[in-house]
Image (tube, helix red, strand yellow):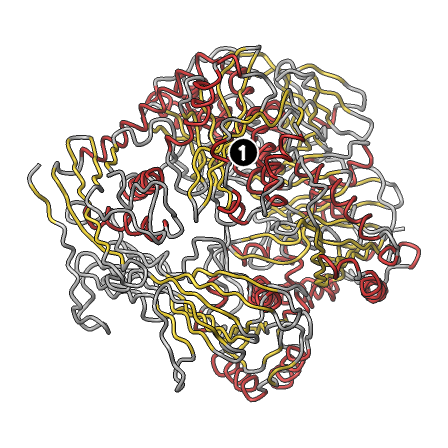
Amino acid sequence: MSIELVTAHAVAIAMIRTAVTGAAEQMALVLRRGAFSSAIHHAGEYAVALLDREHGVVSACLGAPTELGALRGPTRQTEAQLGAAVWQPGDVWLLCDEVLPGAYASVNCFTPVFTEGELIGFAVARANWPDPASPGLAQLGPVLIVHKGQQRAGVLDALLRDLPARHRLHGDLGAALAALRVGAARYTEVAERWGIGTLAEVRDLLAVQTRRRERDRLASLPDGVYRAEGSLDGLGGQRDLTIGIVLRITGADLTIDLTDCPDQTGHGLNCAAGQVIATCQATVNEVLHGGAPIGGGSFRALRVQLRTGSMLDATGTTYTWHEMARQLVSDLICRALAPVAPHLVRAGGGRHSLVISGEGVDPRTGGRWYGAQRIAAGTGARRDADGRDAVQEQGLYLPVEILEHAYPVRLRRFAIRAGSGGAGARRGGHGVLREYEFTGDAVISVHIERTVEPAWGLCGGEPGLPAEVILNPGTAAEYRPASGESFPVRAGDVLLCLGAGGGGFGMAPVDSPGAQPRGDHPPSRPGPG
Amino acid sequence: MGYRVSIDIGGTFTDVVGYDESTGRYLTGKTGSTPHDLAAGVLTAVRQVVPDPAAIGFAVHGSTHALNAFVSRTGARVLLLTTEGLADAVRMADLPGVGGPALAGPGDTVEIGGRLDYAGTELTPLDEKAVLAAAHRVRAEGYDAVAVCLLFSYLNPVHEQRAGELLRAELGPDAPVALSHEVAREWREYERGCATVAEAYLTPIVRRYLDDLEKRLADREIVVPVHVMQSNGGIVTAAAARRHPLQTLLSGPVGGTMGAVALARRLGRPNLICADMGGTSFDVSLVVDGRAETVTEAVIGGQPLLMPMVNVTSIGAGGGSIASADGEELRVGPGSAGAVPGPACYGLGGAAATVTDANLVLGRLDARSFGDGRLLDAEAAADVIGELAARLGLRAVELAEGICDVVNLSMAGAIRAEIMRCGLGWDGHGDPLRFSLLAYGGAGPMHAAFLAADLGIDEVIVPPAAGAFSAWGMLQTEVRKDFTRPFLAAGRRLAQAGGELADLLRDLQQRAQAALSAEDVPMIGSRVLHALDVRYVGQLATLTVPLDDVHEPRREDFTARIAARFAELHERRHGHSSAFSPIELVAVRTTALGDLGARPAMATEPIPADADSQLRPMVFGGQEYDAMLLHRAFLPPGYRLPGPALIVEATSTTVVPPGVDCQVDEFGCLILSLGGRR
């Protein structure tokens, strides 16, 4: 039943596509299933891929927006540095190629894949390690962690020894190695079954197909220059951070120009170039290409222009709140495209606009505790659908029963924040409402974004309500902390956290409540090419 | 001496297997299911295998009735009572795979005052007036059932118990009221709440159908207690199933897996991949080390459910998958022709080219496969396949074979993913557990050899009466009851937990034994097993680590023993373990098992009048072969034949491709050997 000869192209394409996408999915499954860190198993901060001999992507499975180009980098860099002779069967390498202080370090594990002694490509697993893990990692260069199938225990121990999260990382690495074994085995099977020549041919065909599909979609939009702008508060309103976006569609090419933005900030509201490119790729894929599977041909027609030293291409700084800026970039792409592609875009989203954190001593145990919670928000509406309520992007809420067991708090209310989604023909998603009562003293910090210009509506839709935090609401001691503020709370204090709503889409019917225009008309205008 | 009878009520057909204790023989029967009056179909089927219903000494059945109601959202209207402040919480969990509409909407939820703290201590008393008001609302607004899920009831059920008393006092003692601590005594209010709502959702329909079935059987002088398959792979009496209907959710599909467990023992093959493929469905489950692979929670029909269940996963539409052209590429699935209109060859107006049509074109399916005298429409199949082939520039047989190859490869990928989701097969090099593929259902044996090749498996087993194998499996099981208690311990608490844990186990042991007595299981056949859910601190998933006995936690070296056992299991399941990562205990699981007697031999099917052997054309690898078509009943144990061949029986068809060897073993199983040919 081996297929000795591929006579039918239509069938071979289907089979090889099935085999390589299945391989990437299985790698992702094994990584996610075995990992110890919630960043991987809950938040999906990983990417896995099979690469060809020239480091091109054959198939990929992205847990979170990851720049496609970043998957090609580590093997290429290793080969450039150490030469092609470095690739040996049964070896696994580790390379940290990006450290973003305040956010994470990107750590890649990869293995060369051989059939009959010939190198056919690579399997790669990339995951984010928490920031405190990172100092020094980036200076290491490629590290051989498995040699001829044997783990180099000494190397691994030295790598992890000083890291506070070493237990978890050890487990995450074990899961990554298991994922690579699966990827390599599947890759070898595919190559042996159909031959490397056919595999390469089909890979090229699929890439051409993807590229053509993307180009067709872009070509269906009128050429032109589309602009929009939007602003962040600057975490506490110290400074208005307005970002202008310019989208240029020329035939089948799309350029996203994000050079018109403030210089990098001093308080973590920054992104690295790769993060912004990943966000642009993910948004374009979601909005223009309907979330198609990502492969070798993806995003060939997309160029992203950034300005080094700006907050969207920051270097040598901290990146703690990168997601807040990335959410704005994603919303801006939609805002700019709204006049020409209203059927594809979504209104602004409320995600990544409220994080609370707290620390103190648990009176029940005498032990110190620390915890952070993102408050879920609504997403923006589309022309054909309401926004989604209560979208929690970064892991789950702890169940109340686990939360109260682990922290000296009581959750008094946990509900959909009714009315927080912007009105419209389709309404924006609602955020959530969480009301905590503290059962011990603590210090709380809040980080709130996009209160000055909350998630906007599109095509006549209303904006969503911004996020908000109120201490002891409805009492004489009521207090509204500002973004970036830290403040003490006592046992018995109540903290009300209100997640942001998403923007609405289209004019709300006149007889519906909240239909009075609150007036956000996207400052987006098509211009001459 | 009498008969032991099992009945598998599927969506389309009802299969019956009867074991005659005096002759030691099995008989199978089959009839169309009667969805609006399930008992009618059951009685018709039973009459086919047992001449005198009064001679039935034991009866067990499973059905997809509850599962269908669950998935198609046609269960009861449920009012949910939950803790004040948290009414919306049931709408907000954003778990992977969870997405179906909630079984109780936002308007069907009532908040009840009363609060316990994290240790189960009462902070504010239960608001009894609010419970009574909810009871009035149930009556006034015509709700069919009530679910109660209050915070921390897994630690202290007193508020839920009181709410249950008040509701039953108002609504009647037999009113369908589900209390979360009785449904799933585990922490995590969202998941426990979902399970509780699901129980309430199913209670009225499952009770109605069990009551009707028992009454109709009694009318026929079948007076033995009717047993019901549960999702956990064991059986209980209908009386117990009435009290906990959710546990019968998977009662249909798990029969095959439990049959596989029995077969694994008999054949000495401890690791089986069970592929149950019907005309338009494909379910996969695993037997590992002779035991059915079970999970303690799963997402079914978009709802997370907490309960021990055999891990049966539905992957794709099997033979109903539709083939189409996407540019120059062939696509197969994910669309399905369903049972109606079904594949073009069903002759019910289906116009899409499906996998079943492709099989028929290739000669891999006998036109008599309906089993009820109707013939498949070979011309319609040739037409739809030919039309699509022309669009893709292929010959018809080339396309037909391509369709089968693609669907086999993607089913093999889904099976592999399922194995990995269970944390098995991690190393990716072939098959670390040396699985055999067990194929049953009408279409399983048709695809099995190809699936095995794609999976790198050398052996396929096709049991006798493959189409009725799930019903046969139901006769091979034991009584089973599960008990769970949360038990959180890490660090210092773990080191000191031994005494407390041993006390808890002793309590569970007593409950388990009492439950077996209630099911009339003789002492000699009962066993109680204990295990712990363990994980590394920070991990999401747990592994269930068996305990030697109730006294093990009192041992000095208890923590070290559990850590070592867990590490070994983790290494095997995930391919790695971490000697210096701390572990934590999450829950205690106790299982009561009761054996109800011996179950020898295998089933056989009657030989149809038109059975004959002939040559027929079949296509493999682009080449046409004159293949033998043989009726299975004529193949004696020890018989050997090389592929290509087609082996037909009343309910199933086995394809033996060229290069594959088929042998009939002493139990009547067909053993297909791929001999390393992949």
> Residue B328 location in percent, x, y?
33, 23
Q: Residue at x 21, y 41 (%)?
A: A259
Residue A440 placement: quadrant: bottom right
Q: Is residue A4 visible?
A: yes
- Of B403 and A299, which appears nearest the observer? A299
Would you place residue B282 above or below residue A516 in this image? Answer: above
> Residue A283 location in percent, x, y?
31, 43
Would you place residue B428 above or below residue B124 in this image? Answer: above
Seen from this angle, which residue lies furthest left? A528
Would you name the residue on which mark 1 appears? A27
Q: Is residue B515 visible?
A: no
- Of A226 and B626, which appears nearest the observer? A226
Would you place residue A305 above or below residue B378 in this image? Answer: below
> Residue B425 location in percent, x, y?
65, 33
Seen from this angle, which residue lies furthest bottom? B129
B408 left or right of B429 in image: left
Q: What's the chain of the residue with tag 1?
A: A
> Residue B543 location in percent, x, y?
70, 48
Q: Which residue is drawn at 56% across and 89% down?
A: B129
- Of A98 and B194, which appears nearest the observer? A98
Would you place residue B94 above or below residue A334 in this image? Answer: below
B168 left or right of B143 in image: right
> How many other residues sit within 10 Å of disc 1, few (<14), some (14-19) or many (≥20)?
many
Local secondary structure at mark 1 = helix
Amino acid type, callout 1: Met
Quarter of the image for the C terminus of chain B: give it.
top right
- Count of numbered badges drawn on the protein: 1
Residue A57 placement: quadrant: top left
